[in-house]
Amino acid sequence: MRVTHITDPGCPWAYSIEPSITTLRWRYGDQLDWRIVLIGLTENGAEYESRGYTPERQAAVGLRFKRYGMPFQSEPRTRVPGTGRACRAVVSARMDGVEAGYIALRALRFGWFTSTLLMDEDDQIAAALSRAPELDVDAIMSRIGSPDVEEAYQRDREESRQAADSPASLQGKTAIRDGVERYTAPTLIFERGDHRLVAGGYQPLAVYDLCVANMDPTLSCRPGTAEPAELLRAFPYGLTTREVALAMAERNDEPDDAAATEALVELVASGAAEREQLGDDALWRPAAVTARAAA
């Protein structure tokens, strides 16, 4: 089954869906064939400023979105950046493989929402990417302005702006900019053969699970786990506390952040994992990955 993930690294709704994405990846593994499509919400910060955004307003976004469980920081940037350059960085990383593109997207999200980095400047984009030891940051940045990256990025932008008359439009989960109706981030499109289901905009995990189940009920589904070490081994690039909590939960159960934190702290105490401060929360990695990055 193919899953098209239409997104943007600077969207707080898209950032907030990461626990659900991680849980889908845990439950269904390689039965889901993921692809990332970048929207390109703004080419530069002036577009955001024209809509009334300020550094202070962006810094306060965590007050609204913290209930979804992802880490945030509340210190204002010196100015409001646009998202186009960061989108191109994801496209460049994607040329190294689907997983590299996804890890780069996550790293840039953390740069957006847990730091004051200006995410439209190449050196600061590279600084955000460098937190992921799996990425070849020099190669990614060397390609970011290339014709191949630009062509692929413009294809993404065009694809994300084909939302007119779609199920997402009927549900009110699209946006119109410059007279063109586009999908909002995050949108997940599930496809198998000629069948297609569109989950437009932010949706609860149960909606995505329902799409998968209706698209192909013969898939196997891995249950929640009581061992967070299993999750860290499966996703060695690191997980936030809510991602671990949601993937540990049984189907239809609410995530238990406190229980997940307790289990993760025990892993750290045993030397099996390491905790990296991330905004007002943490990123948890297997100890070997952190040690390799430090080396």
Image (cartoon, rainbow, N blue to C red):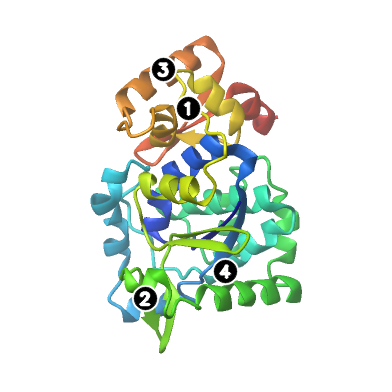
Left or right of 30? Residue 274 is left
Q: In front of the other: label 1 or label 4?
A: 1
Q: Are marks 4 and 3 in contact (CB under 8 Å)?
A: no
Q: Is residue 116 left or right of residue 68?
A: right
The disc, 2 or 4, on the residue closer to the chain's N-terminal end is 4
Amino acid at pointer 2: Ala
Q: Position of residue 282 (x, y in %)?
A: 42, 33
> Disc 1 and disc 2: Cα gap in Å?
36 Å
For label 4, the residue is 85
Residues at marks 1 and 3, CA–CA distance in whole angstroms:
18 Å
Q: Which residue is mark 3?
A: 263
Query: From mark 2 to mark 4, how far is it between C-alphas?
Result: 21 Å
From the viewer's side, name the closer residue of 263 and 186.
186
Q: Residues at badges 2 and 3 in contact (C-beta under 8 Å)?
A: no
Residue highlighted by disc 1:
223
Q: Residue at x 59, y 59 (%)?
A: 36
Residue found at x 53% / y 54%:
108
The quarter of the picture where residue 186 lies is bottom left
